[in-house]
Image (cartoon, helix red, strand yellow):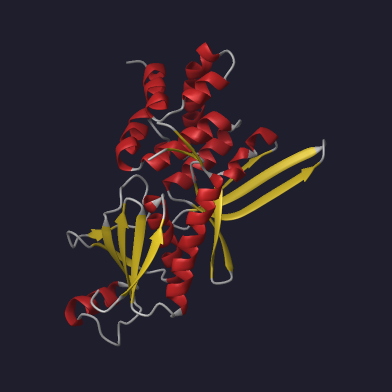
Amino acid sequence: MTETMEMEKLLKARGFEWAIRAYSPSDKAVAHYTEKFSEIEKFMVDRGIGNSAPTLDDLASLQDSNPFKLDAFLEALVSLRSSEMIVGAWRMIQGMQLQSLELTYESAASFALKVSLNSPYGETEVYSTNDIDDMNFVRHLMKSKSGDRPIINGFFALRRPKP
Amino acid sequence: MIGGSDQIINTSFPAEIAEHLLRIIRMEWSEMVLENAETGDDIEFLFLGFQSLPRELFVYENARMKQHWDEEGACEVNANKMFHIILKDQQVTVVVDDPSAAINQNVVNAAVQLSKDLSLGRQEFAA
């Protein structure tokens, strides 16, 4: 099975037909998402974190162990523009914590999003973008409070199958 | 936990809520120790990553408290030093000693808020 076929299988298994239909032309959608997936690995290798790059086997195993994490990643893959922010999403799904987030926007002039992530081992990674098509990253973050302390934790899927 | 108080969180997202609970607890207890309540095995928290959480787990403040629980059971010394988390299909139960203790309130409220936020932010589709 080719990578494109594996990607198509995963997308359909998780109810992402909508993402295939939404891409134009739709018959190139799966190839496009597969290419984006390959670009993630290249980005991570360049950053020196290639060992943590997701493989299609990783995604397939997530389908059994943590389908909600697989859905979150696939939503990032099909909805975010830059490889950098998709990697940021992947690192949060892997367990890195959001340490800080900066979002600035000026109407019809500029957009900037920067997130700093901490690993449980004390390492910090920064991901940033100036492409407003990456704004969806923020929609996947959920908030809560512990006492009076604000907490934004986790990168979550926005869609879920009906039980 | 005999004598504990069940804090029930009704949610469509038990796995997400359970993982969130662990992250919130870790903010309070940086040396927390996790135990699979079904097998008694320790669970490595660092980069939970791809592993599934068990349906039932204990979270201790630290290794010393875990040992204390193992040796003494529930007592005054280890009160409010352990969470018992139980996952069901549409529910997460957090068993605590004293629900009015600040740490217990903070942890449970944070989970309830996340569940509400997830419900607001999500759309369901027919599988």
Residue B96 visible in the current orientation: yes
Residue B10: % across, % down: 40, 58
Residue drawn at the location 36% of the way across and 15% of the way down: A2
Is residue A45 visible to us here? no
Vertical side of B78 occupied by A101: above or below: above
> What is the x, y in percent for residue A73?
46, 37
Side of A139 where A8 appears, left or right: left
Position of residue B83 measured from the top left corner of the image (x, y, whole percent)? 33, 70
Q: Image point 47% across, 58% down: which residue?
A: A122
Residue found at x 17% / y 59% = B39
Q: Quadrant of the N terminus of chain A?
A: top left
B38 and B8: which is toward the camera? B8
Which quadrant is the C terminus of chain A positioned in?
top left
> In which image quadrant can residue A9 be found?
top left
Q: Residue at x 41, y 20 (%)?
A: A8
Residue A25 position within the rendered picture, expressed as x and y whole percent measured from the top left:
57, 12
Q: Nearer the viewer, residue A125 or A78?
A: A78
- Who is closer to the viewer here, B112 or A82? B112
For residue A148, which quarter of the picture? bottom right
Q: Report the front residue among A127 and B104.
A: B104
